[in-house]
Amino acid sequence: MIDESVDQLNLSLKTTDLNQLTCISNISLSSLENPSVSKNHLRQSLSQVEKGFDALVLENIALRKELEQYSGINNNVHEITINKLRAANIFPMIRNRVIFRTRNQSDDLLFSSNNHHRDIIWDVQVGGIDNRYFVSASADKTSMIWSRKTSRPLIQYRGHRGSVNSCRFQCFDHDLVLTASGDHELHIWKLSLYENKHERDQDNDMTPLILRNPILVLRGDDVFSCADWLQRDQIVSASWNRSATIWQIETGRSLRTLYGHNAELTHVSCHQTRPFIITASRDGTFRLWDCRTSSRSVQIFNGHTKTVNSTLFIEDMRFVSSSDDGFVHIWDFRSTSSSPLLSLECISPCNRLSIFNNILAVPLDNCDIRLYSIVNGEKLYVQRRAHKRAVQCTAFVQCTNSIEFLLASGSLDCHMHVWHVKKLKGTNNNKLIKSIERSIGSLNDITNNGNRGKGQYKKNY
């Protein structure tokens, strides 16, 4: 029965197709036999199209006349209005492009790391005696020391077995470097380059010295996202287990664990002269801890709506925070208000901040780097398209005996770039220099303060 039904269906389909072909062939034959019929039909169609087009033109003309009569605007007033609209809307966009556009990035870009790192650069810091070195931390399991003067790699540290998520120079002993890793370990290693200073300065070899052995290893039970020096003999680590730990360097033991966050910690920052700690988390909050008290936390800040990526102290009683919500907030923890003193809207997610002498560098996911004044929140400059992918971290340092600055940046594109701030060819360059001159007290103060950049790990490993 099924086979008979299938045969009948196939026969009906063939019959239908044959009938359609026969119909089409008949139409074609009739057109060939009577070409005048086809011509007449085509002429009728074209005439209908022309009539419809003429009707649209007449309707358009009538609508224009009614609009002119209704508005009562003569040609002169209309022209003035158009000019005002252009001046108010079009020209500002052009001016903004000119102001914040880099004319020649090859002049501004002093150095690029090329292929020295093979994965994401999570952190960049500046330090050493007279801030003569940059240090970078990468997901390729290495940390690199760079010469600020020659921009060449000096040391490659290969002691970790996982992503290196943060790096810090110690302020007291400039040869010590602290690194935190996804291998659940904190390493302290010594910056030992060359005994002969002249040999170090004259050596132009681009092959770094390989260092594998740390002087101290501290082990945790989860991924370390960041670590920072707490005064001379202690360090603080931030972990994915939602807690921060204070470690004693001499004994290698944990002294205290700080609990309270509801998600993984992304960042930790320590005050340079006071026993204060700030921890940031993916729960959208950051907490201020006072190591002199036994209380769990001094204050909880809820000023962001998404992951807080970095926090750092900018003065004795003020600090700044950045978040994936596209905002940078400046806070005063003496204030009884829960609102920030100053808010900077950056549109794109804000990553690991750095600051030097009241100039704040904000790396963004949209590949830009913005410079702000922390005094009044004024936007000083925008380095457009600093990298091919999201900029994760920055480090800010002053050139010797001048008001020029170097800005180092690390990115998801696996490159570290060093930019010359004064060479940025923008209309706002005079504004930047004036702000720097106002904020500079004395060269000795700048040297003593050193770098305060605290840019850290962001999202993934």
Image (tube, rainbow, N blue to C red):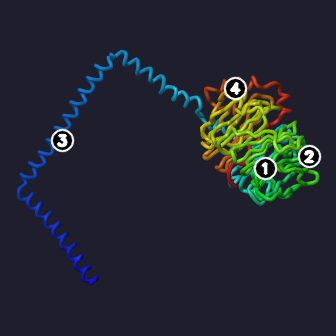
* Residue 88 image position (x, y, % from top left): 48, 23
Of tags 1 and 4, the one toward the viewer is 1
Name, please, the residue furthest toward the right. Answer: 250
Tell me which corner region of the image, top left, top right, bottom left or bottom right, holds residue 327. Answer: top right
CA gap between label 1 and label 2 equals: 17 Å
Answer left or right for 268 relative to 307. right
Q: Residue at x 20, y 74 (%)?
A: 12
**Type of residue at label 1?**
Ala
Of tags 1 and 2, the one toward the viewer is 1
Of tags 1 and 3, the one toward the viewer is 1
For the N terminus, the quadrant is: bottom left
CA gap between label 3 and label 2 equals: 89 Å
Tag on residue 238? Answer: 1
Which residue, given by chain and number where applicable, does mark 4 sit on?
Answer: 376
Tell me which corner region of the image, top left, top right, bottom left or bottom right, holds residue 8. Answer: bottom left
Which residue, given by chain and number where applicable, does mark 3 sit on?
Answer: 49
Question: Counting residues from the N terminus, which is met first, the one under dot 1 or under dot 3?
Answer: 3
Question: Counting residues from the N terminus, which is met first, the one under dot 1 or under dot 2?
Answer: 2
SS state under label 2: loop
Q: Nearer the viewer, residue 366 or 416?
A: 366
Question: Counting residues from the N terminus, which is met first, the one under dot 3 or under dot 2?
Answer: 3
